[in-house]
Structure formats: C-alpha cells, structure tokens
Image: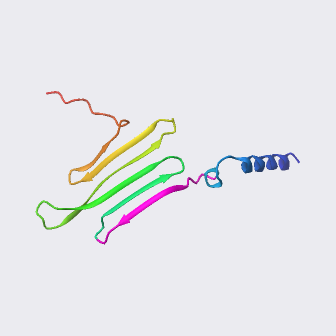
Amino acid sequence: MQTVAALLMLVAVAVASPFPQEVRQGVIPVLQRTEVRDDVGQFSLSYLSGDGTTFSEQGALKPTADGSDHVLVKQGSFSFTSPEGNPIKLTYVADEYGFRPEGAHLPVAPPATF
C-alpha cells in the first residue's frame, strides 16, 4: 500500500511540474533554428534552445594560396550557462591557421620570457 501511495505522489508531482514535458524528461527543446546552405557547401546556421544555449556558425569557401582549390573556413560562437551558474561564451575561427577559440573562461598562457 505504501508503494502505491508513493507512486501516486510521484505522478502528482510530475504532472504539477511548471516545466514542459520535454524538459522534465531531460529533453531541451529547440526554440529557434535557421539554416542556409548553398550548392558548393557554404552555410550559415544558428540555434537557440529552451535553456538559453545559443550556437551560430558560418562556413565559406576560400581559395588556397596557389589558387588551385578551395578550403572551407568556419567561424562561429556558442554560449551557455555552466552547471555552476557562470555564463560561458566562446567565439572561434577555423581556417588555414588552425582552430582559434576565444573566451573569457579559457586559460591564458603566461607571457614568453627570453
């Protein structure tokens, strides 16, 4: 009998929750989404989720130094709130010079000494 009462209590709490069903079950809904792609692979996309997480990225073709081909250069950003409640924002570029992230939360190397 106690098991049935506990189960009914759990169901009542779940139904009375102020969060949508998707969030209660661990699924965070996507509130906004845009995506544009062209025939050669360039793109622009962005997302906003129900927990405030954002993501944006663009990819564009750039000719190689010798002009014989193209490479996809990406740049973008994302932001979210850490489990500790801290806002995290990262921006980045990925091109022929590598992946270069920037964000206030990233560690900084000490200055070089000669």
Determine the residue positioned at 33% across, 63% down.
43
Furthest toward the right, the residue is 1
Count of labels shown? Answer: 0
Furthest toward the top, the residue is 113
Q: Using residue 97 as the reference point, say whether residue 37 is left or right of it.
A: right
- Residue 96 screen position, x and y as percent: 20, 54
- Residue 70 screen position, x and y as percent: 20, 65
Residues 3 and 83: in front is 83
Residues 40 and 97: in front is 40
Determine the residue positioned at 81% across, 49% down.
8
- Residue 24 screen position, x and y as percent: 64, 50
Furthest toward the left, the residue is 66
Q: Is residue 31 above or below residue 83?
A: below
Image: magenta residue range: 25-39
Q: Using residue 79 as the reference point, say whether residue 4 is left or right of it.
A: right
Determine the residue positioned at 52% across, 55% down.
31
Residue 36 sits in which quadrant? bottom left
Q: Using residue 2 as the reference point, say whether residue 102 is left or right of it.
A: left
- Residue 61 screen position, x and y as percent: 24, 63
Colour scheme employed for the rendering of this structure: rainbow
| Magenta stretch: includes residue 13 | no
Q: Is residue 36 above or below residue 90?
A: below
Task: Pick the quarter of the image with the C terminus.
Answer: top left
| Magenta stretch: includes residue 28 | yes
Determine the residue positioned at 52% across, 56% down.
30
